[in-house]
Image (cartoon, rainbow, N blue to C red):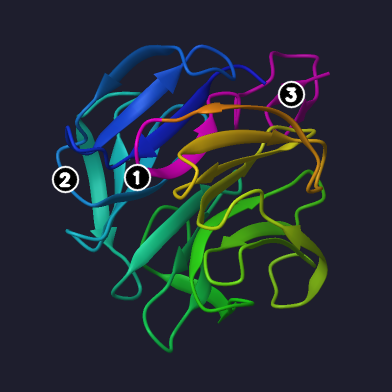
């Protein structure tokens, strides 16, 4: 893992943060230009961010407040976003319509969707096996799906009571919790916590800047890791 990128909705205002590795140390941050920030991801070169105020997914220029593209989310309460190396995957917790969506690239064209496993899907990512990992704030659980589907292959209780964000760093789950105001590093996909630190107040999303990084010629790229 290289550096954590996170989103938070603190009293001082909505911001995106670049951490130094997996730590509370903030290297730089910016106001994203919209309020009610939710999920965040990194597509290999740019931040993708979510706002329930604009009801949109936004693409930033690198790690900066400059927005180069956006589109309306597929439902009225977008909460989570990730990038599968080709397409946006997103989560929405609209009442009675809680779903995960697979987009066509970075666009509001939906190729597939399914109902999330519980009532408040707040985070979504995917792992090295091309399985969706998700977080739910009502069930207080992290789920491993079978591919992009509603079939759950494994789950565990989240470390606190309002899980908001989840990502995969090529070997471990990283998660954010709004009740504890913490970021956690798990041991693989499990409830075992190997490290944690205090996040910014009201954490809303977590990712890392190694996701989607291209491998140099002659090397193999696996989920942000060059081997």
The answer for how far apart the CA atoms under marks 1 and 2 are is 10 Å
**Boundaries of the magenta span:** 200-227
The answer for how far apart the CA atoms under marks 1 and 3 are is 23 Å
Q: Is residue 42 visible?
A: no
The answer for how far apart the CA atoms under marks 3 and 2 are is 32 Å
Which is closer to the viewer, label 3 or label 2? 2
Q: Quadrant of residue 139?
A: bottom right
Residue name at image x 69 percent, y 19 percent:
215
Q: Quadrant of residue 141?
A: bottom right
**In the foreground, 78 or 108:** 78
Q: Are marks 1 and 2 in contact (CB under 8 Å)?
A: yes
Disc 1 marks which residue? Answer: 49
Q: Would residue 72 be counted in the magenta stretch?
A: no
Disc 2 marks which residue? Answer: 34
Which is closer to the viewer, label 1 or label 3? 1
Left or right: residue 226 versus residue 160 is: right
Disc 3 marks which residue? Answer: 225
């Amino acid at each position: 893992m290289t550096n954590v990128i996170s989103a938070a909705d603190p009293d001082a205002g909505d911001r995106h943060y670049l951490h130094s590795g997996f730590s509370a140390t903030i290297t730089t941050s910016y106001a994203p230009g919209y309020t009610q920030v939710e999920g965040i991801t990194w597509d290999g070169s740019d931040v993708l961010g979510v706002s329930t105020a604009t009801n949109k997914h936004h693409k930033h220029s690198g790690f900066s407040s400059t927005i180069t593209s956006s589109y309306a989310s597929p439902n009225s309460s977008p909460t989570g976003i990730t990038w599968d190396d080709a397409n946006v995957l997103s989560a929405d917790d609209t009442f009675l319509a809680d779903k995960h969506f697979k987009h066509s690239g970075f666009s509001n064209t939906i190729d597939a969707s399914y109902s999330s496993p519980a009532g408040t899907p707040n985070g979504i990512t995917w792992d090295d096996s091309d399985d969706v990992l998700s977080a739910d704030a009502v069930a207080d659980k992290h789920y491993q799906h079978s591919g992009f589907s509603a079939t759950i292959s494994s789950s565990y209780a989240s470390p606190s009571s309002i899980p908001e964000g989840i990502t995969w760093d090529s070997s471990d789950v990283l998660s954010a919790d709004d009740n504890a105001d913490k970021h956690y590093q798990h041991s693989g996909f499990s409830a075992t916590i190997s490290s944690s630190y205090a996040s910014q107040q009201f954490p809303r999303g977590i990712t890392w800047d190694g996701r989607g990084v291209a491998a140099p010629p002659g090397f193999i790229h696996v989920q942000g890791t060059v081997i």
